[in-house]
Image (cartoon, rainbow, N blue to C red):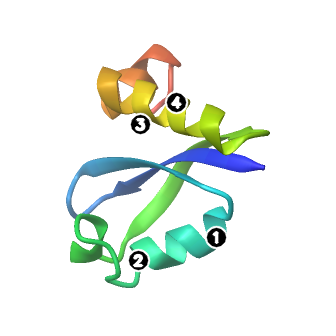
Amino acid sequence: MHYVYIIFSKSLGKFYAGETSDIEIRLKGHNSNKNRFTGKVNDWVLVWKTEFPARTEALKFERKIKKRGIKRFLEDIDFKF
């Protein structure tokens, strides 16, 4: 399975969307200063996820979210901040 996920940093006030086959390991990576954008802080928390059977589907959906804007996407699905 592959997942599209959204994480949030309270200290930055920003969201980040990504795709992975292992959310726990990926979240640890975001919080351990290994990524350019997310490595600035270590308070990222998972706020939303969905799963797909194939990576190609997950990548398409991730691009759709990023094109729409993560915050707008969350508003569209009536996510409560």
Name the amino acid type tagged 4: Lys
Circle 1: residue type: Glu
The amino acid type of the residue labelled 3 equals: Phe
Instruction: Answer with mark 3 or mark 4, whichever residue precedes in sequence.
Output: 4
Of callouts 1 and 4, which one flags the residue occurring earlier in the amino acid sequence? Answer: 1
Q: Nearer the viewer, residue 36 or 8?
A: 36
Task: Judge the density around disc 4: few (<14), some (14-19), many (≥20) Cα neighbours within 10 Å.
Answer: few
Mark 2 or mark 3, which has the lower sequence index? 2
Q: Amino acid under label 2?
A: Asn
Crowding at dot 2, Cα within 10 Å, few <14 / some 14-19 / many 20+, comes out as: some
Q: Position of residue 36 (x, y in %)?
A: 23, 70
Residue beneath disc 1: 24
Q: Indicate which label's residue lies in the foreground, 2 or 3.
A: 2
Residues under numbered marks 3 and 4 in contact, where contact means CB atoms less than 8 Å apart: no
Q: Residue at x 61, y 75 (%)?
A: 25
Query: Within the image, what quadrant is residue 52 found in?
Result: top right
Q: Secondary structure at mark 3?
A: loop
Q: Is residue 53 above or below residue 39?
A: above
Contact (Cβ within 8 Å) of mark 1 with mark 4: no
Q: Position of residue 76 (x, y in %)?
A: 45, 15
Q: Residue 24 at x, y = what percent?
A: 64, 70
Please give the label number shown on residue 31.
Answer: 2
